[in-house]
Amino acid sequence: MNYPPLPEHQIVTDDHKAAFFTRRLLMSLILLLSGVILLAMLLLVGIAWRQNEDAVQQQRFLLSNIWKDKRQSILTDIRDYAFWSEAWNHLHLQVDTVWAFDQQNFGPGLFQEYHYEGIFVVDGQGRTRYSVINGKLDTLPLESWLGIHAAPLIRKARSLAAAEGATTQNVIIGTTPALVAAAAITPGKVPGTGTLPGPPSVMVFVSRFTPEKLKQLGNAVGVKNVRVPTTTQDAFVAPFMVEEVAEDAPIIIRWDPRQPGRNLLICLLPALFFAAFVLGLIARRVINHAMSSAVLADRRFAQLKHSERELAASEARFRDVAETASDWIWETNPQGVITYLSRRFTSVTGFEISRMLGRSVDDILLHETEAVSLWIFQQRADGQRRQLRCYSYSAQNEKRICSLVANPVLLKGQIAGYRGTVSDITQEVEAEARLHYLSQHDTLTGLPNRVYMLEFLRGKLHAQPTAERPLVLISLDLDRFKPVNDAFGYAAGDSVLVEASHRLRGALNAGDLVSRTGGDEFMLLVCDLTNEEEIDHCCVRLQSELCRPFYIGQQELFIGVSMGIALAPVDAMQADELLRLADIALYKSKREGRNCWTWYRPDMAEQLIHRRELERNLRMAIVNDELKLYYQPRYCLQKSRMEGAEALIRWAHPPTGLIMPDSFIPLAEETGLIIDVSNWVLLRACTDALAWPNMMYVSVNISPVEFRSGNLAKRVADALHKSGLAPSRLELEITENITLENPQNALTMMQALKKLGVRLTVDDFGAGYASLNYLKTFPFDGMKMDRSYLHDFPQSRQAVSIVEGIIALGKAFSLTVTAEGIETQAQWEELKAISCQEGQGYYLGRPMPLESFLPLLNTPLLLESHHVEH
Ligand code: C2E
Ligand code: MG
Ligand code: MG
């Protein structure tokens, strides 16, 4: 089996024991085996060496014996001749060459038969008297042939004469060793032989050991290549034999030894090496096998340990999870009888585990429609995680909602039981329900919100309302609710909203829907109203409910209500569409002056679309530089001199042509675009006026909307700063209505503007609803009398006196009075006569583009000359 390799860090030394010990054991075995083989080799070599030694020893002994034999035989031979009376006679007394040599008594025969190369007779005076060398008669003296001093030898021979003894000596002739024997010639035991005065002659035999002779000698005893060493090196190579007698020259003999040991080695050593080699191979295989088995065993052991650790960790993990998880774990047998519950069960349900073991799972977990056990039995081990929402009762008899997960436990393919978890999801379910409620209801009033309302509406539309029994959708918006919030705070605003929602709810039937869709916006869905009259009646009821005073503490508050009505199926059948149409109708109510209701009419949508388009175009107009400023001169009536000009905006809309401010300023105000428009006007006007002579001023109209936005002073300051115009040359025209809405705010704003150094004028004075009181409170510099006052002026006496009154009022408050809308010479002259300071009107000059206006600046007032608006 293949085990996957273990990670390095998990392999501890302990896990390598088998491999370690096996390696050691095998190493010892190898060492032992190698030792045995080495010993065997050594023994073999030892035996071989011994055998060789023995052979050498034996050969040496043989050779030594030969030498001894030779010595013995030369002694015997010489004694035979020396102690022979014939020799005495023929050689001592006189040298008888004929007897000796020719008759072969003592001549070549000794050479041929006995192989004595040298035969000599030396007389009593030491002279060589007879020489036969290599079987030939010669005259060479003994010493010259031998190359040694022969006297000691001769002397010794003579000393032995009495005892008929002879002597031998080893000599080396040239390089050839030789055996020399000497014996004194005596008459022997033969009586009557004569004597000769002086010492006896001495007979000498020389046997030379020539290489051939040596070889033959060796061969005779089975010793090969017996020789005298030819070089000093050869002399000291074993084996050799030294023949040394007393003072004789030592003779070294060499031979080729018999080497039985060598043969033994040649035979056995290769076999031994081969055996060692084979053993090595076998050992290698055995080692490899043993090692891999050991490593495998170690691996298995480590794996086992690893698995054990894993198992322990996994068990610990399971225990931790089982004890710390919010879920509890259960196990049943195949019949659904509980066999195990994790400890968490007790803390979640309050029941003792022991009480529950052995009971059916259906005793603990319940389901509205089916037995939980049946659901569990249906579960398959297919890796799918299915959950069952069921419930159980705690020990305190509290109903808990549970989420059950179950899996079959398989043992050899058979279901051995079931196992799973149960999570208490009561809180989640409750939170979910709460979230669901919140997602569909308004938290403040508890009324359904827009989401719920839309769903409800869709449901109702699904039921197909008819023209006879229409579905009435009322979009409702509280009037003047914002000031309540501003003045009394959000808490007060909230209580008004809650109260308003109660009143609305009370004014409708139970089957109707009241929903809050925005801040002070509500959407009502009213059923069962059959005709217009009933619907109007319902609206009256709603209006009268909301027009009743609201109370914040002791404070009595009045708000109104605007409504828009759309009907299904008459106006639309889609929920979104109906909502949109009701909103359009509501919008109309708001524009119509509030506190009323409007039925949706198809042309309203068209108007709205038109407005939308206009709004989009206006946005583009600012970017595309389609806005223009016209200037209408303002004259000092008394001096008939131009003092300044009013900047009046125009929109040069490419397809439509020049659009007048009345057609787009209200739209700009509603959409908030007025800020961008006004910024453009301020900067343009200031920049243009910079070029005007005589410190002439420019007046710019400011919308009430800009007063609400808060940063007017900064914007004006920016325009002055950017253009570089002196603040005193800028006048801001403001309608008196701004003093009504939020007087405190208006005052603060005006003070900030005055600080900048600009002039402030009341525009269209007398056209609004403000009481004259504000003239006292607000820091105005001038007033522009609304042109309506000049209608009958100066024809009507009454009109003249009213204008006189206004002029007097202006003077009383130190305000410069400007008459707007002077269209005739008569008006001009009369106003001059009653001391009106300034005038403006078509008669004096129409609003005109800058290029037409500039030429007028330095020309005196020539009436009739520029009455036409360009
Ligand atoms: P306004 O401030 O009262 O401006 C005077 C209006 O009276 C101008 O109308 C002008 O053309 C007109 N007018 C002047 N003399 C005579 C006359 O002798 N007879 C008659 N019948 N009318 C005369 P216009 O230019 O159509 O402006 C209308 C209004 O639009 C202005 O009334 C002003 O409230 C507003 N407006 C104009 N330009 C701007 C602007 O830049 N910003 C803001 N917020 N409003 C502007
Ligand atoms: Mg004006
Ligand atoms: Mg005006």
Image (cartoon, rainbow, N blue to C red):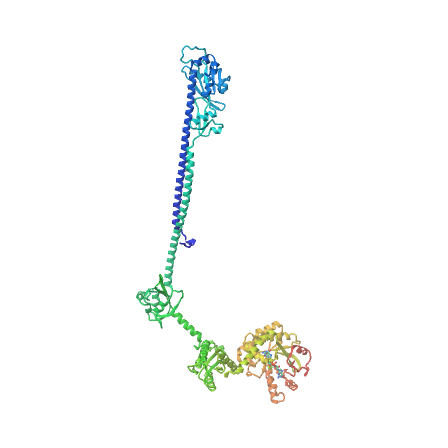
Quadrant where the N terminus lies? bottom left
The answer to which image quadrant residue 348 occupies is bottom left
Asked whether the viewer can see residue 202, the reply is: yes
Who's the residue at 43% across and 31% down the image?
258
**Residue 10 at x, y = what percent?**
41, 54
Towards the viewer: 321 or 852 = 321
**Residue 665 at x, y = what percent?**
58, 79
Number of numbered discs: 0
Location of ligand 3 given as a quarter of the image: bottom right
Towards the viewer: 820 or 95 = 95
The answer to which image quadrant residue 374 occupies is bottom left
Residue at the far front in the pictured view:
103
Asked whether the viewer can see residue 783, the reply is: no
- Say whether residue 803 is left or right of residue 366: right
Towards the viewer: 299 or 491 = 299
On screen, 150 above or below 814? Answer: above
- Say whether residue 866 is left or right of residue 14: right
